[in-house]
Image: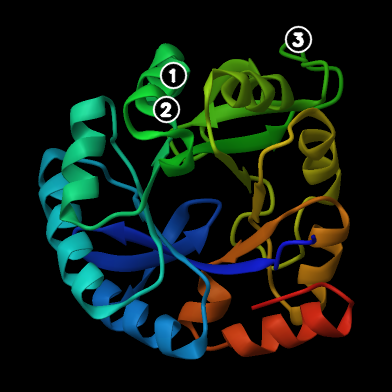
């Protein structure tokens, strides 16, 4: 049975507001996260993803409040990420109303965290967020796949091959891979199809394609390349596209949608 392709709006939250930029810079205010979540729920989004991009101590408290308020308003799964570094962080967010947790930097520093979260809560709650970028040709920091893992909004290399890291995290117990192309992020030029294909070849768990969506015709090729879900932010926040338009484009291309 072929599972329906999920369409997921992403809310990048900073100091309690949704923001969006290009390559994680030049951030613009995009609105109140709870109001946007309510809108996307009504429009037929399959899930929502919250990423606390500042992940400061204050931001963590804000995220807890936002998660609680949103969980009361919407009835689709919520994935929350940003600054999560322990099973206790996961426990608090799940109690606040999150359905899934996205981990990124903390897992890079201590991969065993992936196994600990999966063992305690089940791999269905664990999403590994991978911020990947292409390695410049001829670079001394080359990787086998040509893609590296980054941190700090794509500005720092983690010294890991992005495809190998996704595969390792899947073995450790990650339930999904949120695959964000830092080169494409916010550009609206389309998803990085090569990156999706490479990761799809190495993992059997669901892959969520992120970074680069600008038009409805960008979404079906990402699924053709191996994505199980497609995620976008600014095109939804600023009204360029509607969730139902994306679903229609996917359905027209022969992909099942809810």
Q: What SS does tag 2 mark?
A: helix
Q: Residue at x 28, y 36 (%)?
A: 83
What residue lies at 16% left-to-right and 70% top-to-bottom?
69
* Residue 118, numbered circle: 2
Between tags 1 and 3, which lies in front? 1
Total of numbered circles in the picture? 3
**On the rendered image, what quadrant is the N terminus found in?**
bottom right
| Foreground residue among 124 and 33 | 124
- Which residue is nearer to you in this view: 252 or 157? 252
Q: Name the residue under label 1.
A: 115
The answer to which of marks 1 and 3 sits earlier in the sequence is 1
Label 1, secondary structure: give it. helix
Please give the name of the residue rendered at 16% of the width and 63% of the height, measured from the top-left corner.
68
Q: How far apart are marks 2 and 1 (CA)?
A: 5 Å
Q: How crowded is mark 2: few (under 14 residues within 10 Å), some or many (20 or more)?
A: many
Query: In this rendering, does residue 241 appear at all?
Result: no
Residue 143 in picture, x, y percent from top left? 77, 16
The reply, left or right, for residue 114 in relation to residue 183 is: left
Nearer the N terminus, badge 3 or badge 2? 2
Q: Residue at x 40, y 63 (%)?
A: 77
Q: Name the residue under label 3.
A: 140
Cα separation between marks 1 and 3: 32 Å
Quarter the C terminus occupies:
bottom right
Q: Can you see residue 247?
A: yes
Neighbours of disc 3 within 10 Å: few (<14), some (14-19), many (20+) = few
């Amino acid at each position: 049975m072929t599972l329906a392709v999920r369409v997921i709006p992403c809310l990048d939250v900073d100091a309690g507001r949704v923001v969006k930029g290009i390559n994680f810079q030049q951030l613009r205010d995009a609105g109140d996260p709870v109001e946007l979540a309510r809108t996307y729920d009504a429009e037929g989004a399959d899930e929502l993803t919250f990423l606390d991009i500042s992940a400061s101590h204050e931001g963590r408290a804000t995220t807890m409040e936002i998660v609680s308020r949103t969980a009361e308003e919407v009835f689709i799964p919520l994935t929350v990420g940003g600054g999560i570094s322990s099973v206790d962080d996961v426990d608090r967010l799940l109690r606040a109303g999150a359905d899934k947790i996205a981990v990124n930097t903390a897992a890079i520093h201590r991969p065993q965290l992936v196994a600990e979260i999966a063992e305690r809560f089940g791999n269905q709650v664990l999403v590994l967020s991978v911020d990947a970028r292409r390695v410049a040709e001829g670079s001394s920091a080359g990787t086998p796949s040509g893609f590296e893992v980054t941190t700090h909004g794509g500005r720092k290399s983690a010294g890991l091959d992005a495809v190998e890291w996704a595969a390792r995290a899947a073995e450790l117990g990650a339930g999904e891979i949120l695959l964000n192309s830092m080169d494409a992020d916010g550009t609206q030029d389309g998803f990085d199809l090569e990156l999706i294909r490479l990761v799809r070849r190495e993992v059997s768990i669901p892959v969520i394609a992120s970074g680069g969506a600008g038009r409805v015709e960008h979404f079906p090729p990402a699924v053709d390349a191996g994505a199980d879900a497609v995620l976008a932010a600014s095109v939804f926040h600023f009204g360029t596209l509607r969730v139902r338009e994306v679903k229609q484009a996917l359905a027209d291309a022969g992909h099942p949608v809810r």
